[in-house]
Amino acid sequence: MNSITRRDLFRTTAGAGVALLAAPSLTIAADEPAKLYTLPKLPYAFDALEPHIDAMTMEIHHDRHHKAYVDNLNKALAGTDWAGKPLEEVLAGLAKLPEKVRGAVRNNGGGHYNHSLFWQLMSPKGGKPSDALSKAVEDAFKDQANMFKLLKEAAMTRFGSGWAWVTVKEGKLKIVSSPNQDNTLMDGTGSPLLGIDVWEHAYYLKYQNKRADYVDAFFKVINWDFVSERFATLAKG
């Protein structure tokens, strides 16, 4: 599969919805019609992350689960003033949404944002963190090994479904976890930098109930170039 282009990223997020995944937010001109959120292409083949993440899981996770979040998000926002707005703006403004759609937008908007980021956080190429990111990791966690230890603990202690995150706020890193498809844009406590999906559909075909093994596998396919670029953008505030 081809890599996600800048045009694909903007179209994926209704012209601007997850621009923070790689760059500062864009806005939609007042005279533009509301645009639908769309499913992004994977930036690699389904089997590219083998043997760490299996092809069948990637196909089902992307083509079925993520697609369902996109479809349900569009349905929830249809006919509202929020349709087609930048997704990070929608998630940060959940309390302002009509109550009858708020839950659906929280779950499906969060699912769309989180997964659009998640695919880009992984790569068969691996790599290493930039000097700036490495310094931030050292300041917050002492070293990368300890960051992985703490992130794994967050992933393992998240009961049921959810995410474990490394977040950025004012250039500082922090590890948290969130339930379901929540993320830290929703409560304003930071911007997601690196995240692990610990819903069972992310790993059960290969790892069954061995979540710890899946987390260790995820650490082996982190796209450090993308994470480093994202950190540089987010650290600027």
Image (cartoon, rainbow, N blue to C red):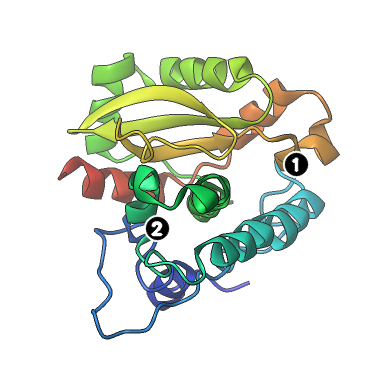
Q: Residue 29 carries which label?
A: none
173 over 55 or under it: above or below:
above
Amino acid type for the residue under numbered disc 1: His
30 over 13 or under it: above or below:
below
| Residue designated by label 2 | 87
Residue at 40 percent of width and 30 percent of height? 166
* Left or right side of 187 for 126: right
* Left or right side of 179 for 52: right
Residue at 37 percent of width and 42 percent of height? 95
Label 2's element? helix
Residue at 65 percent of width and 19 percent of height? 159
Query: Residue 222: image x %, image y %?
Result: 51, 41
Q: Residues within 10 Å of mark 1 (few under 14, many from 20)?
A: some
| Residue 25 appearing in the image | yes
| Residue designated by label 1 | 201
The Cα–Cα distance between marks 2 and 1, rounded to whole angstroms, is 24 Å
